[in-house]
Amino acid sequence: MQLTPALARLVEELGKLPGIGEKTATRLALFILGAERTYVENLAEAIWAVKAETTQCQQCFGLAEGDLCPVCRDPKRSEESLCVVEEPADLLAVERALGYHGRYHVLHGVLVPLDGIGPDQLKIAPLMERLRRGMIREVIIATNPTVEGEATALYLAKIIKPLGIRVSRIAHGIPMGGDVEYIDSVTLSRAIEGRREM
Amino acid sequence: MQLTPALARLVEELGKLPGIGEKTATRLALFILGAERTYVENLAEAIWAVKAETTQCQQCFGLAEGDLCPVCRDPKRSEESLCVVEEPADLLAVERALGYHGRYHVLHGVLVPLDGIGPDQLKIAPLMERLRRGMIREVIIATNPTVEGEATALYLAKIIKPLGIRVSRIAHGIPMGGDVEYIDSVTLSRAIEGRREM
């Protein structure tokens, strides 16, 4: 294909984004080429800025600009509940789900002893320090339902409970709109185990 | 959702790209945030450069850097065949299809008399000038099979044929892998009309 060098380069860079193949990259590149100059400047500037301006929240280790993230800075969020997630993206997913008005703590990973990732490689020490300060009454563990995510949840429950803090795990079961017939058996047995009286 | 300002801005800008919704934009933004600094710099720079460096080819009106596009500059391309397309993206699609080794001419639109788009609004005068120079023996019209694209093809055929140049139209029919049972009737009748002896 006879792309100009600048266009070929943009297609190549866009093609490195997750889920963007060559055809989509070409379509996006041509759109960018045809878009208004102000939009193109804003887009390039926003890409640059997100890397330059985003920091790690000093308290929850989520995404921030400056010292604290928007949640940690928000005085209206409950100090009694803390949701523990693996990555900043998980924090955003819980925020998107609405309904949760407590605080967060981002572990930045899960325990994988075989890969040498133990408690010291995660943000577990600062989590324990936050909990010892005594405001938090419940910790909701929202690590992924993978082997490592489950093991990390169990480990956290074991070390947090002695502080007299309630520890809960987000429910696993059939997703809304899902189909009992086609759901995998592990999920279905978790759904039955976690049944609630109606 | 509690996005940091820089992240919220990037999600907004990415969400303006065609086919990118809020969820995909968030995923891409988080990927960019987590990507290596050199990649992010290259991406922002490539977006900026494509707008700053891309020009219009002085001969075929396709995408170029400098005066001429890669096709017009290529001495190995046949001077005898000229493919007329609506937009630069169509030129790239024909290039991607391989098998065509002639030159191109980009109209930058189609005739839409009701919207005031006549021959003077398209690159038709420079097309006729190229044809009068006498190298080209066949013009292949590859405008889209829409009402306007067809009308533009007919118009071009009418003004080009008197120059003694062969004018052809790309074939319309059932796409490869398509299904005779489910194809629309207009396409099917065009496919029968355009049948070829085996």
Image: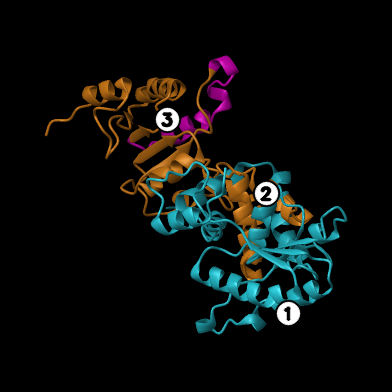
Chain colours: A orange, B cyan
Disc 3 sits on a residue from what chain?
A: A
Name the amino acid type tagged 2.
Answer: Arg
Question: Left or right of B187: which side holds A80?
Answer: left
Disc 1: CA contacts within 10 A as few (<14), some (14-19) or many (>=20): few
The residue under label 1 is B125
Above or below, A66 relative to B163: above
**The residue tagged with tag 1: helix, strand or loop?**
helix
Question: In the rendered structure, the residue with mark 2 lies on which chain?
Answer: B
Q: Nearer the viewer, residue B179 or A28?
A: B179
Residue at point 58% right, 43% down?
B31
Residue A193 vs residue B6: left or right?
A: left
- Amino acid type, mark 3: Asn
What crowding class fits label 2: few (fewer than 14 Cα within 10 Å), some (14-19), or many (20 or more)? few
Q: Are marks 2 and 3 in contact (CB under 8 Å)?
A: no
Assign a secondary structure to mark 2: helix
Residue B62 position in % (x across, y down): 73, 65
Say which residue label 2 marks. B96
**On screen, residue A137 above or below B144:** above
The number of numbered discs placed on residues in the rendered structure image is 3
Q: Which residues are magenta?
A: A113-137
Q: Position of residue B36 (x, y in %)?
A: 68, 41
**Where does residue A124 sit, x and y in percent of width and height?**
50, 29
Q: Is residue A58 left or right of residue A164?
A: right
Marks 2, 3 in one chain: no
Q: Crowding at label 3, few (<14), some or many (≥20) Cα neighbours within 10 Å?
A: some
Magenta stretch contains residue A30: no
Which mark identifies residue A22? none
Majority secondary structure in the magenta region: helix
- The residue tagged 3 is A144
Instruction: Please tell me in which quadrant of the rendered image residue B126 appears.
Output: bottom right
Question: Going from the N terminus, do you reach mark 2 or mark 1 first?
Answer: 2
